[in-house]
């Protein structure tokens, strides 16, 4: 996604902008701190951050700091993974200070990932990288893991000052640490300055002469492998920045919250191993992928590593798998058709039979239920496919697959318990924390493993910690508050969803609804999300598709306009209140290949909403359009 450069307005000084931010902070909308998923009604992906900053600049010129004006600013980026209003405000303040485009300032929750982002870009560009640092270098950057597992190359150079650095045939990163948040100007012969701030995270500054593709590619690493500095931490950073005072971190009971979260996750999943909690679902997925690559390199040297991924699954999963593969010669992504006319078990059997002939290392990533079609495979057949012993061409036993299960839709199903359907299959399960685990209050995601994966979980933890992608203290605190009620919320939300689905079936029988059967619900699959293929009209396939896409938006817009306090155009679900509507092809499948996208309506209901009102508005839709 190409971002437009925002050039600083030189008509007002840095002190003016700093004063403006100071006046803005008491008036920020509560959503700027609390919202983890974007509002699609004020979101234009093509101009996400540039549009936000353009309109912020207008408010700045008017010296308008009112909460109502701030609340009307368009959504900045998509999740807090890629960015949010407060991170944009901090980056804008830095840019004003050192007179560079705001696009060249990028905040991160992790202090390791921005370095990896530059190394990744330079690997693909075939450019050398020099890492200069003052004080202690993070252990992960000292180790050979970055080179041996991630495939990145770099030189290390410790220095007290970058002013005397000699020229380098490549790019230079300077890592430095501060107790007060301020923008460090770029020194000669330095291309990236990484300002690290205690437990808040860091801010990366890019030299303005760099190819602009560096901005986009580094932002995309933040989108897929980590998150921006969290809203709460960004608020702390902004207070330090505008007041020129040391960072103040509110004391927390971090260890107690972490311990409680681990206990609650084990209680919910019945997993025998210690859970791992990352700053987001994709942060934990990245640790899983790199941990498994590390394990394969160590235990199956020289063999090809295959990540088997449904082509229409959540776009972040799909994109991340391909991003890992493009950096490593021995890693490849293999498509796994799972939805509609394709049977997951049959596809797994076909792929594993072929990879046995190749003597490859198979890692399968799949969602159960699938997204967005909400399908559950024959679990007994799935288990059989995964534990079937296969042979390589020389007659030796093929490497057994690891099943990586995205359980976000139904995190309460006990796949990994000793009695669970996958209890004795190498399985790692993970869930996005912005859904049911936190009720939408934070992004932290977690993963668990069964007894068969103890060694693998150790590798995953190594990469989660090494990438500085573990959940923050506040994220642990929120999960500790929310996890105890998760199963009750799942049950209540499912009840609302089942009721609404039954009503739609009655009022619009020609629509195709993708939802779990009553039998599957009895087995414990009780999601609160369903997808809807609306009936269409037309003489040609193109006319029918166009009509259906138009009808999708009419339904969503009617729901939002008629019930604005509850119905939202948003990609999330598992929230504490309301009803969320989206079209997967234009949201969660944003980076999925066009032919694999689903132009259908996906809806998700919470435990707390006016269901009768939603039914009445749906009936209104049927009367007007269907």
Image (cartoon, helix red, strand yellow):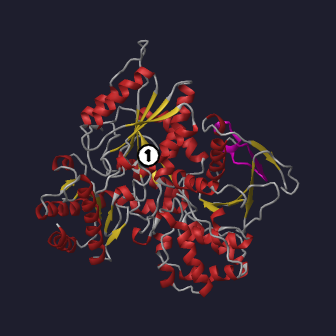
Circle 1: element type: helix
Establish if 526 lies above or below 17: above
Quarter that holds the C terminus: bottom left
Residue 32 visible within the image: yes
Residue 44 position in % (x across, y down): 46, 67
Establish if 140 lies above or below 542: above
* In the foreground, 435 or 508: 508
Residue 131 lies left or right of residue 293; in this view the side is right
Establish if 544 lies above or below 34: above
Residue 581 position in % (x across, y down): 32, 64
Residue, disc 1: 318
Membership of 331 in magenta stretch: no
Q: How many marks?
A: 1
Residue 598 lies left or right of residue 181; in this view the side is left
* In the foreground, 237 or 67: 67
Which residue corresponds to the image point at 45% horizontal and 22% vertical from the top-left?
359
Which residue corresponds to the image point at 47% horizontal and 79% vertical from the top-left?
72
Neighbourhood count class around disc 1 (C-alpha, 10 Å): few under 14, some 14–19, many 20 upward: many
Question: In the displayed image of the protein, which residue is found farthest to the top?
Answer: 394
Question: In the displayed image of the protein, which residue is found farthest to the right?
Answer: 164
Which residue corresponds to the image point at 51% horizontal and 59% vertical from the top-left?
81
Residue 229 position in % (x across, y down): 58, 62
* In the foreground, 269 or 593: 593
Q: Quadrant of residue 565?
A: bottom left
Residue 77 visible within the image: no
Residue 522 position in % (x across, y down): 19, 48
- Magenta span of residues: 127-145
């Amino acid at each position: 996604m190409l971002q437009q450069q925002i050039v600083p307005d030189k008509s007002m000084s840095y002190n003016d902008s700093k004063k403006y931010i100071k006046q803005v902070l008491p008036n920020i909308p509560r959503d700027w701190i609390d919202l983890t998923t974007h509002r699609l009604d004020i979101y234009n992906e093509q101009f996400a951050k540039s549009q936000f900053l353009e309109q912020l600049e207008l408010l700045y010129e008017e010296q308008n700091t009112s909460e109502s004006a701030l609340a009307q600013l368009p959504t900045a980026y998509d999740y807090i993974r890629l960015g949010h209003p407060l991170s944009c405000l901090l980056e804008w303040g830095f840019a004003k200070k050192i007179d560079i485009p705001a696009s060249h300032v990028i905040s991160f929750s992790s202090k390791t990932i921005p370095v990896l982002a530059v190394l990744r870009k330079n690997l693909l560009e075939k450019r050398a990288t020099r890492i200069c640092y003052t004080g202690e270098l993070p252990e992960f950057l000292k180790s050979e893991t970055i080179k041996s597992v991630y495939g990145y190359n770099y030189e290390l150079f410790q220095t007290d000052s970058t002013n005397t650095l000699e020229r380098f045939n490549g790019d230079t990163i300077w890592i430095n640490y501060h107790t007060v948040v301020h923008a460090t100007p770029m020194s000669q012969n330095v291309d990236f300055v990484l300002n690290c701030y205690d437990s808040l995270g860091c801010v990366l500054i890019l030299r303005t002469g760099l190819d602009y593709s560096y901005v986009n590619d580094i932002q995309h690493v933040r989108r897929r492998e980590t998150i921006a500095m969290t809203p709460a931490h960004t608020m702390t950073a902004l207070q330090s920045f505008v007041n020129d005072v040391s960072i103040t971190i509110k004391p927390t009971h971090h260890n107690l919250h972490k311990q409680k979260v681990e206990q609650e996750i084990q209680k919910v999943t019945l997993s025998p191993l210690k859970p791992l909690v990352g700053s987001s679902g994709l942060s934990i997925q990245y640790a899983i992928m790199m941990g498994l690559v590390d394990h394969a390199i160590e235990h199956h040297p020289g063999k090809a590593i295959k990540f088997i991924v449904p082509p229409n699954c959540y776009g972040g999963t799909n994109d991340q798998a391909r991003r890992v593969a493009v950096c490593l010669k021995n890693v490849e992504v293999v498509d796994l058709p799972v939805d509609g006319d394709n049977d997951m078990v049959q596809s797994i059997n076909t792929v594993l039979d072929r990879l046995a002939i190749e003597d490859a290392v198979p890692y399968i990533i799949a969602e159960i239920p699938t997204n967005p079609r909400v399908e559950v495979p024959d679990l007994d057949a799935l288990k059989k496919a995964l534990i079937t012993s296969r042979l390589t061409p020389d007659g030796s036993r093929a490497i057994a697959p690891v099943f990586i299960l995205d359980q976000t839709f139904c995190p309460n199903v006990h796949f990994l318990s000793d009695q669970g359907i996958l209890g004795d299959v190498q399985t790692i399960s993970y869930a996005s924390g912005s859904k049911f685990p936190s009720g939408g209050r934070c992004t932290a995601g977690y993963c668990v493993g069964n007894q068969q994966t103890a060694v693998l979980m150790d590798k995953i933890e190594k990469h989660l910690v090494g990438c500085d992608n573990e959940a923050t203290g506040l994220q642990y605190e929120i999960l500790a508050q929310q996890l105890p009620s998760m199963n009750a919320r799942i049950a209540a939300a499912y009840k609302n969803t089942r009721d609404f689905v039954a009503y739609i079936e009655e009022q619009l029988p020609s629509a195709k609804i993708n939802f779990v059967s009553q039998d599957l619900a009895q087995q414990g699959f009780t999601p609160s999300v369903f997808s809807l293929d609306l009936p269409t009209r037309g003489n040609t396939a193109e006319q029918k598709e166009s009509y259906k896409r138009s009808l999708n938006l009419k339904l969503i817009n009617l729901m939002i306009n008629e019930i604005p306090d509850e119905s939202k155009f948003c990609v999330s679900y598992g929230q504490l209140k309301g009803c969320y509507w989206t079209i997967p092809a234009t949201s969660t499948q944003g980076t999925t290949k066009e032919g694999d996208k689903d132009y259908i309506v996906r809806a998700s209901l919470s435990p707390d909403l006016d269901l009768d009102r939603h039914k009445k508005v749906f009936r209104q839709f049927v009367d007007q359009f269907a």
